[in-house]
Image (tube, rainbow, N blue to C red):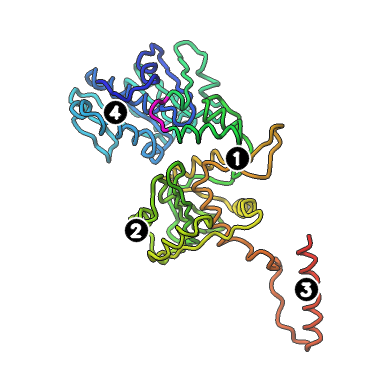
Amino acid sequence: MSDPKASILFRQNFSSNAHIVINQGGTSSGKTYAIEQVLFCLACATEKLVITVVGQDIPNLKAGALRDAAGIYSSSDALQVMVKNYNKTDRLFEFHNGSLIEFKSYDNAQDAKSGKRDYLFVNEANGIPWDVYCELALRTRQKIFIDFNPNIAFWVHDNLIGKPGVQLIISDHRHNPFLSQQLRDKIESLKVVDEELWRVYARGLTGKISGLVLNNWKVADELPADAQLLAAGLDFGYTNDETGLLMVYKQDGALWVDEIFYETGLTNPDIAAKLAENSISKNTEIVADSAEPKSIEELRRMGWNISPAKKGPDSVKISIDILKRYELKITRRSVNLRHELSRYKWKTDRSGRVLNEPVDTWNHLIDPLRYVALNKLGAGKRGQFKTWLPAPPAPEGGALFGNISMEILQQHKKQHESI
């Protein structure tokens, strides 16, 4: 089976004689796509192969490897002839020659003991525990493919690279001939804002990404039935930047966050259609990027309850400080938000000193989360005096007592504002 969109990564993976082929790469290098092209070729060429593609969870697979596989399948007439059935529900490609490609995730090492296979592809391996990988590898007869973005060294570097029978392929966006120049420029621009991110995502080199802005989050399987909706958050994008919408809830002192959509190329009518498609009520409060007043007004005229984020001096830092007060519980299906949180870090200067400002990239869901924090969880309008003490009761000792109390309060307010 030939594919006109085959890259050098396809040829290197297809021709490798190693038992374990490791693809360490930057963002948009095309490594996942190339490996899956190889897997489709193997399934077509040999009868009754069992090929397993493993991800850390099903939402990650659907957003990444499975979406790429579906794209490869739908764009190849020759492949469609060879595939007997594509079962979207079971995430399974069945071939006329008896081969199959399955997409799975495993909760733990015990779960990974079920089933054997001829070929294994571990997608985004830094999300897979070492003991799960070991069980899968023991039950793989022929070859293992692995890919990941090298944010930080993990078990692949500690236990596999450099061992006999292991080949390492390092790639970056320059190895993918099908990217737009705009996307290449966006990736390369990381060098200006953070060289460590540039090394990882623009050059595919093993990084030491530290100084993440938000570490107070964990994955939740689903939203609580009784969670209180605070608001939706919306960030506008178009060509290179995604338009992101999420819902923010509060329950038991934690914030629960659920990603709704994350796409490029959305016009305002498209956004309105997406809101309706995802059953967002027109009564739901939407907090949006105040830098887009025209878009906010257009959506408001379409009937949506949308308002701008209350930005101001230090609003980024203030909103981050607000979010740090809570435990953040991110739904498992919020794949893009989870990816952003894993990359969202503080800027550093040339000497490596951490600056009090986050890197302004990969934040098209984090920004709307901040907008909701500003509007719904902030301490009130800028300059308004707030006290953590309960409000005093109405004065009962006559006008003198009330006036003296107000005078003291005003003095305290002036002192507070001067700090």
Mark before the other along the chain sequence, 3 or 4? 4
Q: Amino acid at mark 4?
A: Ile
Q: Which mark is residue 101?
A: 4
Who is closer to the viewer here, 190 or 14? 190
**In the image, is residue 391 part of the stretch drawn in magenta?**
no
**What segment is highlighted magenta in the picture?**
176-180
- Mark in front: 3 vs 4: 3
Q: Residue tagged by mark 2? A: 276
Residue at horizontal 34%, vertical 21%? 119
Q: Quadrant of the C terminus?
A: bottom right
- Tell me the CA gap for discs 3 and 1: 40 Å
Tell me where residue 49 sits by quadrant: top left
**In the image, is residue 177 part of the stretch drawn in magenta?**
yes
Q: Residue tagged by mark 1? A: 345
Mark before the other along the chain sequence, 4 or 2? 4
Query: In the rendered image of this protein, does residue 36 appear above or below residue 381?
Result: above
Q: Judging from the image, what secondary structure is the residue with disc 2 in?
A: helix
Q: Residue tagged by mark 3? A: 410
- Tell me the CA gap for discs 4 and 1: 37 Å
Q: Judging from the image, what secondary structure is the residue with disc 1 in?
A: loop
- Tell me the CA gap for discs 3 and 2: 49 Å
The prevailing secondary structure element of the residues shown in magenta is: loop
- Tell me the CA gap for discs 3 and 4: 72 Å
Is the Cβ of the residue at disc 1 closer than 8 Å to that at disc 2? no
Query: In the rendered image of this protein, does residue 76 appear above or below residue 385?
Result: above
Q: Dot 4, how many residues are within 10 Å of its Cα: few (below 14), some (14-19), or many (20+)?
A: many
- Tell me the CA gap for discs 1 and 2: 34 Å
Tell me where residue 123 sits by quadrant: top left
